Image (spheres, coloured by chain):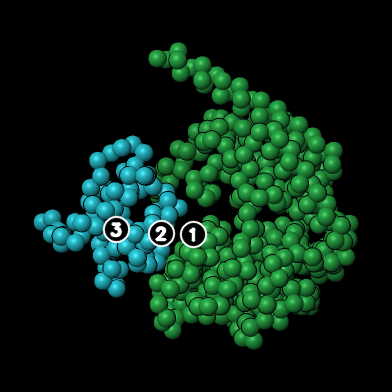
Chain colours: A cyan, B green
Amino acid sequence: MEPEVESPEIDSIVSDLCDMLQRYNKEQIALGAETSLSSELNIDSVEVMDLIMEIEDKFDIDIPINLISDVETVADLARLVHERMKGG
Amino acid sequence: MDIFDKYSLPAARHEKVLKAGTDPFGVRMEELYSATEARVDGKRTILVGTNNYLGLTYDPLCMEAAIEAIRVHGTGTTGSRIANGTYATHVALERALATFLDKRSAMVFPTGYQANLGILSGLAGANDVILLDADSHASIYDGCRLSGATLVRFRHNDPADLDKRLARLGGDDRCKLVVVEGIYSMLGDRAPLREFAEVKRSHGAYLLVDEAHSLGVLGDHGRGVAEEQGIEHEVDFVVGTFSKSLGAVGGFGASSHPKFDVLRYCSRPYMFTASASPSNVASVLAALREIERRPDLRRRLWANARALFDGVVAAGFEVCAEMSPVIALRMKDEETAIYAWNRLLERGVYVNLALPPGTPNGACLLRASVSAAHTPEQIAEVIARFGALAEDLAALERAAGARIPARL
């Protein structure tokens, strides 16, 4: 399967998200689009929701927490942010 | 692949906890001596983590009412409220609760957890939005999820943040339900309800307050944080539990909304579970009367809270919130919290060990809750044992400090 081609907007969101994720990066691993929030960063269920609040404020959008159950990687999260910015 | 593989992380964490001593999530009360003492691991232990705020579990009137109810109505109803499980006493308790809270109607549930499940999932649907405080109890999160509503979380106890998030939603015609608690169970801090009510009014939202830890505890009549702050008329829905100040098991939802009772045949957690047992219903009815008849219980509770709060602060502990019957001591990390919890239990004091993600902001806590039934002597003894714990922890710090240079 070919890797998904992401838009430049999403790349830029990924980079913003990686900055925000540094706070949760206890092991100081390299962060990128394919970094897994739960298995690589060990972010627990409450931390994910706290992160979502920060993202909502940074991008001035709302991300209902019902939408985050399918989020596994930073790229998943970036796509969700992108969708909500478009008024999704 | 094993079906339990998904729990390998929490299971490994639990193994680590077990190595440090007693299982904090499997403590056995071998024999209860009173509302405030039990035998744990063969040792007489003072209980300072039971949420038994008024000590009514051993109130003679409540116990006699429960015993009499078993003689007259039997041990269980064997049916749901919409079938054979509504006894005259269930209806009487609902009337008594509604009268006590000055609401038009109240619905009783078999547990406090189910009350939140039933009320939240009943009130909100797929086309509604629930705005919930970030530090809400698991039963609130679960009830919200079950509702299928859009869920937006706002920063804990922050009415300005709620205002911002409501504004972000825009003025669409979806119904908005704001959910907060009176006293928060983990830290013991309480909601600025007056400010929340202003925000909800300005956005035309509904307000639900879970008074689980504040009913019987706050307000001149014990009706909770809304009474204390003088804004009961602004609270559209109240949820509460029988398993704290009322000394039994069960929960309720109450409201003056004229259509509230539609939930009796539209809320699945209300409809599809057996009703509360007759003894439970009877003891809660008696407990409500005791709360009304004996304001001295509340005074004793707060005097005990004050004494324990001052005592642990003097011993050098960091308490997470203003003084309340819930006194949460912040430990510096999980290992220290587990160590401290074990040392306290060995000294004959039971408190709750509270760890993330069950706590806000990753806090590791020793969570104490006081009761009106604690005697001044017990409180003094608990403070002395906390003092000894503080010395243990200081010795641990010194040992850790001494180890670091040795390694360098």
Q: Which element carries disc 1, helix, strand or loop?
A: loop
Residue B50, x across and y down, in percent: 71, 49
The residue that disc 2 covers is A53
Between the C-alphas of marks 3 and 1, the distance is 20 Å
- Indicate the secondary structure of the residue bearing disc 2: helix
Circles 1 and 2, Cβ within 8 Å, touching? The answer is yes
Q: In which quarter of the image is residue B66?
A: bottom right
Numbered tag placed on residue B155 in the rendering = 1
User: In the image, B350: left or right of B273?
Assistant: right
Nearer the observer, disc 2 or disc 3? 2
Amino acid carrying label 2: it is: Met
Q: Which amino acid does label 1 sit on?
A: Arg
Mark 3 or mark 1, whichever is nearer to me: 1
User: Which residue corresponds to the image point at 81% horizontal and 57% vertical from the top-left?
Assistant: B298
What is the three-letter code of the residue carrying label 3?
Answer: Leu
Q: In this view, does B149 lie above or below B402?
A: below
Q: Distance between the residues labelled 1 and 2?
A: 8 Å
Classify residue A16 as left or right of residue B57.
left
The quarter of the picture where residue B350 lies is top right
Residues indicated by labels 3 and 1 sit on the same polypeptide chain: no
Examine the rendering and report whether any part of residue B312 can be seen.
Answer: yes
